[in-house]
Every structure is written in C-alpha cells, then in structure tokens.
Amino acid sequence: MKKFWKVLGLTALAAALVPYRVRRDDETGQQTVEALLWQVTRGPGEDQTHQQIDVSLGFKSPFQAIREEKKLFTNNPQEAVLFADDEPEAAAVPEIDPAPAAQPEEPTKAAEPEATEEDFDPDL
C-alpha cells in the first residue's frame, strides 16, 4: 500500500509540474508556458533590448483556458462583420435568401399500379 501512495504522489507531482500548453504570439514575440500549478510568460521588455519574464503560481485549469478561447470565435456572420475593420473584403457578407425560390417539380417515374384482390392468384 505504501508503494501505491508513492506512485500516486509522484504522478500528481508530475501532472502539476509538466507543462500542458505552450503558446507563441509571433506579432509580439511573447511565449507562454502553462502547467497546472504555474505559468511562465516570456517576451520582449519595454525597451526591446531585454527579455521580460513573468511567473505566476496557482492552479491553472486546462478546461478554463479552452472555454476562454472558444469565447473568442463566433459563427454568426452578422457579428463577424463587426471585427473585419482592416480588410473590407472580409466584411462582405453574402445575402442569403431565407425562402428559396420555388422550383418546378420534375415529373417522377410513373407510379406502379397497386395490387388489388383481382391480381391475387390463390393457386400460387
């Protein structure tokens, strides 16, 4: 039983200290490494000659980060127009007709006649 607790403790320690996400922002040159109990952010300093490193300790849930990222994106085309400032072509939303035009129905194959009692042969 003592070995079980040792293995469980080492597994929990490794899960808390091993990073689960590394993000890089190419525009700012900032890199973020996240683990369950810590987060390190490294990027250029204010004078662009030194590196700035920020370390924060505390519980960081990976599920919370996923939910925050999902909030950044939208599937609504009307809302997407609001964020297309730099590219006017991206703001063009095609007009969608809510009721499609009625198309003439194509004639289908002649329906097969239904079987009646006269078609039934009792000898078979």
Image (tube, helix red, strand yellow):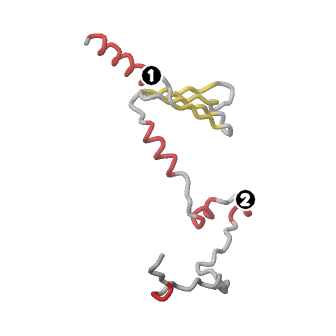
Q: Nearer the viewer, residue 30 or 10?
A: 10
Label ID, residue 17: 1
Q: Position of residue 85 (x, y in %)?
A: 67, 60
Amino acid marked by disc 2: Glu
Q: Position of residue 123 (x, y in %)?
A: 46, 78
Amino acid marked by disc 1: Leu
Name the residue beneath numbered marker 2. Answer: 87
| Quadrant that contains the N terminus | top left
Which quadrant would residue 74 be assigned to in this image?
A: bottom right
Residue 83 visible in the snapshot: yes
Residue 103 visible in the snapshot: no
Label 2 or label 1, whichever lies nearer to me, is 1
Instruction: Name which residue lies at 64% across and 74% down.
Output: 96
Pick out the residue farthest to the top. Answer: 2
Instruction: Name which residue lies at 60% across and 61% down.
Output: 80
Instruction: Name which residue lies at 68% across and 37% down.
Output: 26
Could you tell whether 33 is left or right of 87 in the image?
left
